[in-house]
Image (tube, helix red, strand yellow):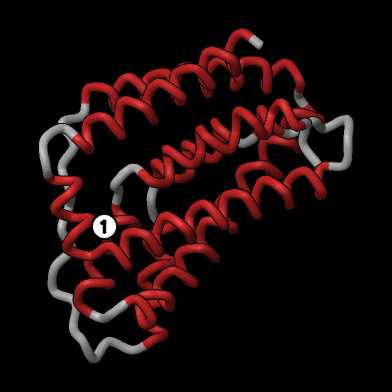
Amino acid sequence: MPDISLLAVFIPTFFFVAITPGMCMTLAMTLGMSLGVRRTMWMMLGELIGVALVAVSAVLGVAALMLKYPVVFEFLKWIGGAFLIYSGVNMWRAHGKIVIVDGVAPEVSNISLISQGFITAIANPKGWAFMISLLPPFINVEQAVASQLTALVLIILMTEFSSMLAYASGGKSLRLFLQRGNNIRWMNRIAGSLIVGVGLWLALG
């Protein structure tokens, strides 16, 4: 298990990253409005499998690099920190628009929904970049990596599922709320501030 102090940083940071409107969240909202929450869960299943694959691949790849080339990892730590700071600043500056996913046929199969969620998760370069930058700092390679990785991935999956379920269930009401005033902008700013903080911690820690 990761240290409690690390989890206290990781959980709120990833929560605000997950809940901020993005492709997966708007896809869940659109499918929830057009197909219903129950059928949207098939897409969520595929997305969660994809997110788990990306997270595990990112951590194992970086952990192996850390053990074999510690100097290179030190360099990548600065690169990762800079990327997170850059991403956080961009989130602060974002105006906050919901991307509406159209053209969802009501007769789409469950397999197609699973595939759609899975592909959306693994084909998102920003998702890979965030996992590679955000997860490794919370892994201590001097301790059992498997248990730490399992705990972090479970937190990620529960957060992702809860966020998608909220978007799918909220439907039109949530969409109207997010489009009202500066609601999305403030969500982006909270998430951006947390991401910048983690980036500074990664680079200087």
Q: Residue at x 43, y 78 (%)?
A: 42
When asked about the image quadrant of residue 40, the answer is bottom left
Q: Residue at x 37, y 59 (%)?
A: 166
- Which of these two is toward me, 76 or 81? 81
When asked about the image quadrant of residue 167, the answer is bottom left
Spot occupied by residue 126 in the image (x, y as percentages of width and height)? 39, 41
Screen quadrant of the N terminus:
top right
Question: In the image, 171: left or right of 113?
Answer: left
Question: In the image, 116: left or right of 100?
Answer: right
Q: Is residue 40 above or below residue 6?
A: below
When asked about the image quadrant of residue 142, the answer is top right
Look at the numbered disc 1 and give the secondary structure of its residue: helix
Spot occupied by residue 87 in the image (x, y as percentages of width and height)? 37, 26
**Furthest-right residue in view?**
143
Q: Residue at x 51, y 63 (%)?
A: 48
Q: Is residue 143 above or below residue 197?
A: below
Spot occupied by residue 204 in the image (x, y as percentages of width and height)? 61, 8
Badge 1 crowding class, 10 Å Cα cut-off, few under 14, some 14 to 19, many 20 or more, is many
Q: Is residue 37 above or below residue 19?
A: below
Question: In the image, 139: left or right of 106?
Answer: right
Amino acid type, callout 1: Thr
Question: In the image, 113: left or right of 130?
Answer: left
Screen quadrant of the C terminus:
top right
Total of numbered circles in the picture?
A: 1
Q: Which residue is mark 1?
A: 26
Q: Is residue 202 above or below residue 185?
A: above
Spot occupied by residue 162 in the image (x, y as percentages of width and height)? 47, 58
